[in-house]
Amino acid sequence: MCVNSGFINSVASTILHLLIPKVHVTKTYLPDLQKYTELLRKVWNRNYVTNNGPLAIELEQRLAQYLGESHLAWMSNGTIALQIAIDSLNLTGSILTTPFTYVATANSILWQKCTPIFVDIEESGFSIDPKKLDNMIAPDTTGILAVHVYGYPCDVDALASYADLKGLKLIYDASHTFGCEYRGKALAGYGDLATLSFHATKVFHTIEGGGVVSHHKDLAEKIKLSTTHGHKFDDYSQVGTNGKNSELHAGVGLLNLEGFHNVVLGRKNIFDRYLKAFSHTDLFMLDPSSYRDFKYNYAYAPVLFSSEDELLKVVEELNQQNIYPRRYFYPALNTLPYLNPNSCPRAESVSKRMLCLPLYHDLELESVDTVISVVKKYVLCHA
Ligand SMILES: *Cc1c(COP(=O)(O)O)cnc(C)c1O
């Protein structure tokens, strides 16, 4: 009898593949189920599940306190937060923004019937380049929507002074920044408004959720009313949408906030292991300590390869080992088929070469070391 060893090997490797647990780019942190059940029992007893219930109010206050900000509206997701931010500042016409972000940033501009103008990213970083704004501004431009990509601060001084000079509103998509501090305050505290996402894939989450940070009482009220159809009981004062979030989500948020410190510590440990391993290679990894007066939340572990080819080889080999890093953010948004292409060479090049490595608080070090050794096989290492 002829034994086909190739066939047997491939069956064996398929079985192995099914048995090894998958490692994704992130893993949602879930609170203790017993504690959550206790919260749920109270919700059931009250029979009050949404419309700014007691847990939602408590969470909103705690989040504001955590950020050190007086006005934070907690809402149903980070995309409605962007839409409400754009709407509440009455932005029209065109908005200067970055092509290197999640698609929700540009989509929110379009959804609000404004036009995104894509400004390329910094030569040395990954956020919008303030020096390139003046080439791109149009007569109908009313605002800037910048993103603190991966939770690292934009050039906030240059953006604020350009916005002042031209009379533009400045919004930050601060979706990645919960837990980041810059020059003694929350990174989400910069700009006229900043939005947060508390989606399950984010470093702090309420399963689905988002927020808008603002700095004036009247604007804060307008934003809050926008989430509740524009009315409080029988008082109808403005147009609104439904951006409310539920007691069930608030409960998860309250418990996750208790565990947040440990989540960040666990992530830091893994992040530092990557950083050290890649320090003498051609791979570029942002180092939070290269920013002055900055505290990072370790939301992502992005690494920049010298070529897309290197990246694709690493992804292929990691996938064979059941490890699934993600290309955040690919493709560059200025190349989306439903938009008029204007070129942003740096963003297009970076988006092809950037890979986010697996990072979560209880990721096994064994998996981290597998990732490191596969990456090192394909990048140039120096002695
Ligand atoms: C996650 C994310 C959003 C959207 O948030 P959702 O809560 O998923 O709606 C917006 N912008 C950026 C940069 C994000 O990463």
Image (cartoon, helix red, strand yellow):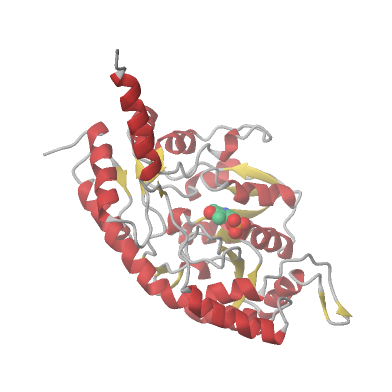
Q: Is residue 282 visible?
A: no
Q: Quadrant of the C terminus?
A: top left
Q: Quadrant of the N terminus?
A: top left
Depth check: 173 or 133 in front? 173
Q: Position of residue 363 (x, y in %)?
A: 33, 57
Question: For the point 38% across and 73% down, which residue is it?
Answer: 261
- Dividing the image into four quarters, tell me where ligand 1 lies: bottom right
Q: Quadrant of residue 217?
A: bottom right
Q: Is residue 206 visible?
A: yes
Q: Quadrant of residue 50?
A: bottom right
Q: Position of residue 9 (x, y in %)?
A: 31, 26
Residue found at the very far top of the displayed protein: 2
In this rendering, position of residue 215 left or right of residue 124: right
Question: For the point 63% across and 73% down, which residue is it?
Answer: 248
Depth check: 356 or 279 in front? 356
In this rendering, position of residue 231 left or right of residue 302: right
Q: Position of residue 275 (x, y in %)?
A: 26, 52
Q: Position of residue 182 (x, y in %)?
A: 40, 68
In this rendering, position of residue 192 left or right of residue 183: right
In this rendering, position of residue 349 left or right of residue 250: left
